[in-house]
Image: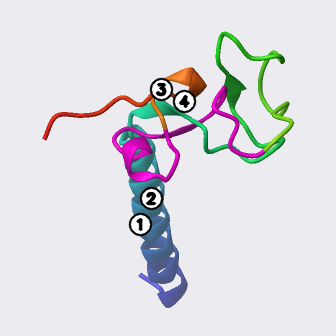
């Protein structure tokens, strides 16, 4: 084989490995949960059932307990003012 052919085969192999790694990472998406009370104004993913607006990007104030942002499961309880229920109700997890 010529040097150019060897180089082409090596680059093709590296690209194939990179694409396989990307596909594998996409398959391992974390489960998400709604975390109320942490969204910045205009940066919410959606809102609770009692909210004055319909959905994404419509939060009018920071940290409204009726608006949520989707976060990886298990992290909402670790965020200041984060709640798993709309309206600011706190869901405590057993330790």
**Whole-percent x, y for residue 39 in the image:** 68, 43
Distance of label 1 from label 3 (alpha carbons): 53 Å
Q: Residue furthest left?
A: 95
* Residue displayed at 76% across by 46% down: 62
Answer with mark 1 or mark 4, whichever residue precedes in sequence: 1
Disc 3 residue crowd, few under 14, some 14–19, many 20+, Cα 10 Å: few
Answer with mark 2 or mark 4, whichever residue precedes in sequence: 2
User: Element under label 2?
Assistant: helix
Answer with mark 2 or mark 3, whichever residue precedes in sequence: 2
User: Element under label 4?
Assistant: helix
User: Element under label 3?
Assistant: loop
Residue underneath mark 4: 88
Please report contact status of discs 2 and 1: CB closer than 8 Å, yes or no.
yes
Disc 1 residue crowd, few under 14, some 14–19, many 20+, Cα 10 Å: few
Foreground disc of the pair 2, 3: 3
* Residue displayed at 45% across by 62% down: 18
The answer to whether 20 appears left or right of 55 in the picture is left
Residue underneath mark 1: 13
Foreground disc of the pair 1, 3: 3
Q: Residue 77: which numbered mark, if any?
A: none
Magenta stretch bounds: 62-82
Foreground disc of the pair 1, 4: 4
**Whole-percent x, y for residue 64 in the image:** 70, 36
Please report contact status of discs 4 and 3: CB closer than 8 Å, yes or no.
yes
Q: Residue 89: which numbered mark, if any?
A: 3
The answer to whether 23 appears left or right of 51 in the picture is left
Q: Is residue 71 magenta?
A: yes
Residue underneath mark 2: 16
Q: Is residue 81 magenta?
A: yes
Q: 71 and 17: which one is in front? A: 71
Give the vertical position of 14 relative to 21 (above or below): below
Q: Quadrant of the C terminus?
A: top left
């Amino acid at each position: 084989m010529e040097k150019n052919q060897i180089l082409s085969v090596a680059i093709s192999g590296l690209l194939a490995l990179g694409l396989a790694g990307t596909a594998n990472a996409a398959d391992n998406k974390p489960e998400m949960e709604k975390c109320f009370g942490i969204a910045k104004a205009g940066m919410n993913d959606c809102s609770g059932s009692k909210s004055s607006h319909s959905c994404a990007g419509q939060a009018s104030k920071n940290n409204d307990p009726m608006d949520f942002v989707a976060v990886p499961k298990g992290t909402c309880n670790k965020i200041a003012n984060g709640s798993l229920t709309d309206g600011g109700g706190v869901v405590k997890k057993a330790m």
